Amino acid sequence: MKLQEQEQQNSSLSRKKMIPPYMKAVSGSLGGIVEACCLQPIDVIKTRLQLDRTGTYRGIVHCGTTVSSTEGIRALWKGLTPFATHLTLKYTLRMGSNAVFLSVFKDSQTGKISSHGRLLSGFGAGVLEALTIVTPFEVVKIRLQQQKGLSSELLKYKGPVHCVRTIIREEGLRGLWGFWAGAAPTVMRNGTNQAAMFTAKNSFDLFLWKKHEGDGKILQPWQSMISGFFAGTVGPFCTGPFDVVTTRLMAQKNRQGGELKYKGMIHAIRTVYSEEGLLALWKGLLPRLMRIPSGQAIMWAVVDQVTGLYERRYLFNAAPF
């Protein structure tokens, strides 16, 4: 009887005092910094493979060894500054906005959130991050990553700021609009990814560890990494074509008076399919499966520790350890 009363008290407390969006945002920013530093080489390899139309690279390992041997090991961290900045801002917005959307879909009486509520919250967070952060940052990142070599004299873009200035100077107003090139497939990719990821992460936490948000239980980092890894595997299979098309649209240069190869998302999908075959729409899938699930594992290990400690300290007034 006492146990039931205690559970009711804990349930009531979790309904009244959920983790605030700002704390979710802070935890996401910390996770983004750690993830970016660990996984940047995989992102560079993914971009090179997706832009390879002549068969220069024979796979992930060959691409990585070729880049490091011909351009230096530092080339695998090309675009780290915009990548780390964009990940930090993206995860801050993603985690914070998802928490806000979840509060909208939360049942006011029971405090529970339905499956479709989690899906819509994740999709909304993905769309928001795609339009405000991901698209312009990825344009700069991809332009930097597609350059070969390390000598600054031979590189067109010397860094993120110089890249932005050069695009605006050489491509004019259309170049400025080009910072949102690939916005449509990016919205589809990120929205679908986050809808799947948030829903799957919650399901894996519940199924594997009996963890409910707001229950005061802090998962071990390895537990968070397992849940995060599995949650991050679904999206890449579903959104492969959107990711390839996003990269192609962002990488193409738009000079004044010039003709663009890809006119938009649908045209790009048709062109890639007709010129390179169906499997080309899933180019870079393996490095995505190496990067995204691994990235989610790292990010959630950080996020769960921060939010778990907050739950224990401020929601349950318990010692953090």
Image: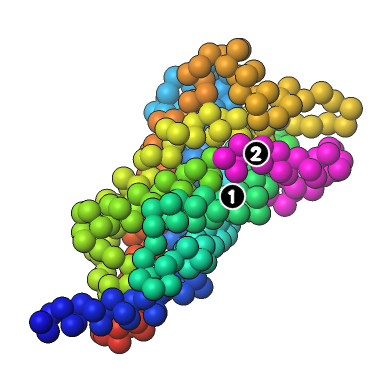
Residue at the image point whose x is 84% and y is 25% from the top: 258
State which quadrant residue 140 falls in.
top right
- Say above or below: 256 vs 132: above
Please give the residue where the numbered disc 1 appears in the rendered image: 127
What is the secondary structure assignment of the residue under circle 2? helix
Decide which of 155, 297 is in the foreground and name it: 297
- Say above or below: 82 vs 265: below
Residue at the image point whose x is 33% and y is 56% from the top: 202
Overall secondary structure of the magenta stretch? helix
**Quadrant in which the C terminus appears:** bottom left
**Residue 59 x %, y %:** 42, 23
Decide which of 185, 124 is in the foreground and name it: 124
Tell me the amino acid under the disc marked 1. Answer: Val
Residue at the image point whose x is 49% and y is 31% from the top: 240
State the residue lying farthest toward the bottom.
Answer: 317
State the residue lying farthest toward the front.
Answer: 109
For disc 1, the neighbor class at 10 Å (few under 14, some 14 to 19, many from 20) is many
Please give the residue where the numbered disc 2 appears in the rendered image: 184
**Quadrant in which the N terminus appears:** bottom left
- Say above or below: 259 vs 291: above
Decide which of 99, 92 is in the foreground and name it: 99
State which quadrant residue 246 falls in.
top right
Tell me the amino acid under the disc marked 2. Answer: Ala
Q: In this orientation, does residue 72 appear?
A: no
Residue at the image point whose x is 82% and y is 23% from the top: 259
Which range of residues does the magenta coloring cover? 159-188
**Residue 248 x %, y %:** 63, 29
